[in-house]
């Protein structure tokens, strides 16, 4: 067993009882192994590389301009933020832009299907990669199911809710955790669009390009027409003006206070998924190192403008406590003198939600393909069609699973889980950028530059301040940066909990609370300064996140704070989902493939079929 890098392992027990420790060594290697980052391995793909920059922008914009425009503004303004939805959106946008920058660098380094799953596999190891991938499966399934329900809801709204009323009367569902009726329309839409996605990526990209143009035109109409119906008094409603029996908070621009703003930001965060879908195309893009980062930035800016305009307009058109949580824009136009405009909005909503659904399903199918290719899920999910060169079985399986969720489950009850999953994935991506930026470049060192694996306290203290002014990362500097990132994440959790739990004491300038907060923030700043002065990697990348380590560190802090804002029930649900995933990982991996590991445990790590290398963590 290789040295840990900090202390030499005791060999006596292993030497005396090698058979007893063989399985333990195998398991340790299994959960800590990393995927090869060799550019030749990365360039190989069984999928067709047919997407260009224009296609990627269409996918990013089409995916992003969905729930965040036509559904989430109504929910957040009605129950959490009121007119302050603009503030919630802005906070989520800052974190999303930073996450988008991190995704752009990582996709330029590793243009593979799987997004945060593949990034963590290359950077951290298999166990963390599986947890991230399993969490993203939850995000994509719930996200696409909620989009399918919303799409069916918009169609039903146009039909005066006749379909839902009939199904509630004829096939009611009484279980609390299920929907009040089976949504067959959402199920049918899911299967139809999944079938299109499974057998032709080029048709999918063409649909995304066309509908993205339609969406953009409709959004311009909504913003202009809504501005003509705007009333600034709707941002200045006082508490005594809120109708009795209506949950309207304290009135004003932030009727539910700062906590409502932050909870709204945590929910809004899930809407920024365009750059995630763009990064999922890593194995199907022409010149991915250039096109993926560019498309991610263009998509983020376009989606930002659309969200900001729509969120402001609907709260000016209608008081926040009258907003419809399911179809806010349609409802707002219906209540104004421009009721005819709801037909134009309906075209945009159906078009936008359809493309957003396709983008989510695309990301889900490519994630299943990547995980099955790495033997972490059933192999058949990664099977590529010989003619269309798409993971058609995985796509169809994803469609059936999502369709069943949309058919019978009340997705709104699970929507907060999406935010947790997305925030976890984006935090891991930011951490991966830091780890890679300060990682030791093994291929740039010769045998004469071999370093001792034994680190002394004196050397560690000197390297924390980089007194030697090193220009190239070493094992010691890499170890220090890794440890500091872990400590920084812990401090982010402590700061978030302190601010949330002791907010009244901090607001009242309680000396104890203020002192604790200042100490924690000071420690975080010191860690960032120490990381910033460490030697950086010499690897050449087509795109790099600016202002490292500041931008990734801010992203991690905001993501963790937003996660801490979500309630305990949401965390219990996510914990249960993660526990199920770990059971699958243990049973499927350790039991089904133990013979394979045992037979190959003594072979060279670079000979494994998926180019997985065993590295020290």
Image: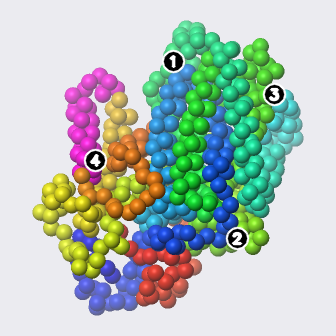
Q: Residues within 10 Å of mark 1 (few under 14, many from 20)?
A: many
Q: Quadrant of residue 341?
A: top right
Give how far across and how far down residue 474 sits, in percent.
Answer: 26, 66
Contact? badges 3 and 4 (CB < 8 Å): no
- Which residue is situated farthest in the top direction here? 240
Nearer the camera: disc 2 or disc 1: 2
- Quadrant placement of the N terminus: bottom left
Q: Residue at x 51, y 81 (%)?
A: 608
Give how far across and how far down residue 556 sits, in percent.
Answer: 40, 46
User: From what the image shows, is residue 235 above or below residue 525?
Assistant: above
Q: Earlier in the sequence, mark 3 or mark 4?
A: 3
Q: Residues within 10 Å of mark 2 (few under 14, many from 20)?
A: some
Q: Which residues are magenta?
A: 504-532
Contact? badges 3 and 1 (CB < 8 Å): no
- Decide whether the magenta segment is chiefly helix, strand or loop: helix
User: From what the image shows, is residue 110 above or below residue 320?
Assistant: below
Q: Quadrant of residue 473?
A: bottom left
Q: Residues within 10 Å of mark 4 (few under 14, many from 20)?
A: some
SS for dot 1 = loop
Q: Nearer the viewer, residue 360 or 21?
A: 360
Q: Earlier in the sequence, mark 4 or mark 1?
A: 1
User: From what the image shows, is residue 250 above or below residue 511?
Assistant: above
Q: Earlier in the sequence, mark 2 or mark 1?
A: 1
Q: Which residue is mark 2?
A: 384
SS for dot 2 = loop
Contact? badges 2 and 1 (CB < 8 Å): no
Q: Which residue is mark 1?
A: 253
Q: Which residue is mark 3?
A: 343
Spatial CA distance of label 4 from label 1 is 35 Å
Q: Nearer the viewer, residue 167 or 330?
A: 330
Q: Which mark is residue 528?
A: 4
């Amino acid at each position: 067993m290789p040295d840990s890098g900090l202390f030499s392992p005791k060999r006596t027990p292993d030497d005396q009882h090698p058979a007893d420790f063989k399985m333990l060594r195998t398991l340790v290697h299994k959960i800590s192994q990393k995927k090869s980052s060799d550019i030749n391995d990365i360039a190989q793909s069984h999928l067709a590389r047919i997407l260009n920059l224009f296609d990627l922008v269409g996918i990013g914009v089409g995916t992003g301009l969905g729930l965040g425009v036509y559904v989430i503004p109504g929910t957040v303004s009605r129950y959490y933020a009121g007119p302050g939805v603009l503030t919630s959106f802005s906070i989520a946008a800052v974190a999303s832009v930073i996450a988008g920058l991190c995704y752009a660098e990582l996709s330029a380094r590793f243009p593979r299907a799987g997004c945060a799953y593949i990034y963590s596999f290359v950077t951290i190891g298999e166990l963390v990669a599986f947890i991230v991938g399993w969490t993203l499966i939850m995000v994509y399934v719930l996200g696409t199911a909620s989009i399918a329900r919303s799409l069916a809801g918009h169609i039903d709204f146009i039909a005066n809710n006749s379909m839902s009323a009939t199904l509630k009367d004829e096939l009611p569902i009484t279980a609390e955790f299920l929907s009040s009726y089976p949504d067959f329309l959402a199920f049918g839409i899911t299967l139809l669009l999944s079938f299109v996605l499974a057998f032709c990526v080029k048709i999918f990209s063409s649909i995304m390009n066309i509908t993205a143009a339609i969406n953009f035109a409709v959004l311009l109409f909504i913003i202009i027409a809504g501005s003509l119906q705007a009333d600034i008094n709707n941002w200045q409603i006082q508490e005594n003006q809120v109708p009795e029996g209506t949950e309207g908070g304290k009135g004003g621009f932030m009727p539910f206070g700062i906590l409502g703003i932050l909870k709204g930001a945590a929910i809004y965060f899930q809407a920024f998924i365009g750059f995630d879908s763009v990064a999922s195309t890593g194995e199907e893009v022409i010149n991915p190192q250039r096109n993926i980062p560019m498309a991610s930035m263009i998509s983020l800016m376009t989606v930002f403008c659309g969200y900001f305009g729509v969120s402001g307009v609907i709260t000016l058109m209608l008081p926040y406590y009258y907003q419809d949580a399911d179809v806010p824009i349609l409802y707002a136009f219906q209540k104004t003198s421009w009721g005819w405009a709801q037909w134009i909005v309906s075209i945009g909503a159906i078009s936008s939600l359809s493309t957003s659904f396709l983008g989510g399903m695309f990301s889900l199918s490519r994630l299943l393909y990547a995980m099955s290719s790495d033997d972490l899920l059933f192999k058949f999910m990664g099977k590529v069609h010989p003619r269309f060169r798409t993971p058609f079985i995985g796509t169809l399986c994803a469609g059936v699973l999502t369709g069943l969720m949309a058919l019978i489950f009340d997705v709104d009850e699970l929507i907060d889980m999406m935010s947790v999953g997305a925030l976890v994935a984006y935090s891991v991506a930011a951490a991966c950028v830091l780890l890679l930026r300060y990682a030791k470049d093994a291929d740039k060192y010769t045998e004469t530059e071999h370093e001792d694996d034994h680190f002394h306290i004196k050397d560690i203290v000197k390297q924390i301040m980089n007194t030697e002014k090193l220009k190239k990362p070493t094992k010691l500097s890499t170890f220090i940066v890794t440890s500091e990132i872990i400590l920084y994440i812990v401090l982010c959790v402590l700061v978030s909990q302190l601010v949330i739990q002791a907010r009244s004491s901090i607001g009242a300038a309680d000396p104890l609370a203020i002192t604790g907060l200042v100490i924690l923030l000071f420690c975080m700043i010191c860690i960032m300064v120490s990381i910033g002065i460490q030697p950086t990697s010499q690897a050449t990348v087509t795109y790099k996140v600016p202002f490292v380590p500041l931008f990734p560190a801010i992203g991690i802090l905001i993501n963790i704070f937003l996660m801490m804002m979500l309630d305990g029930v949401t965390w219990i649900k996510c914990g249960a989902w993660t526990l199920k995933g770990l059971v699958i990982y243990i049973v499927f991996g350790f039991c089904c493939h133990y013979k394979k590991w045992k037979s190959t445990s003594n072979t060279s790590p670079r000979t494994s079929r998926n180019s997985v290398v065993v590295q020290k963590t």
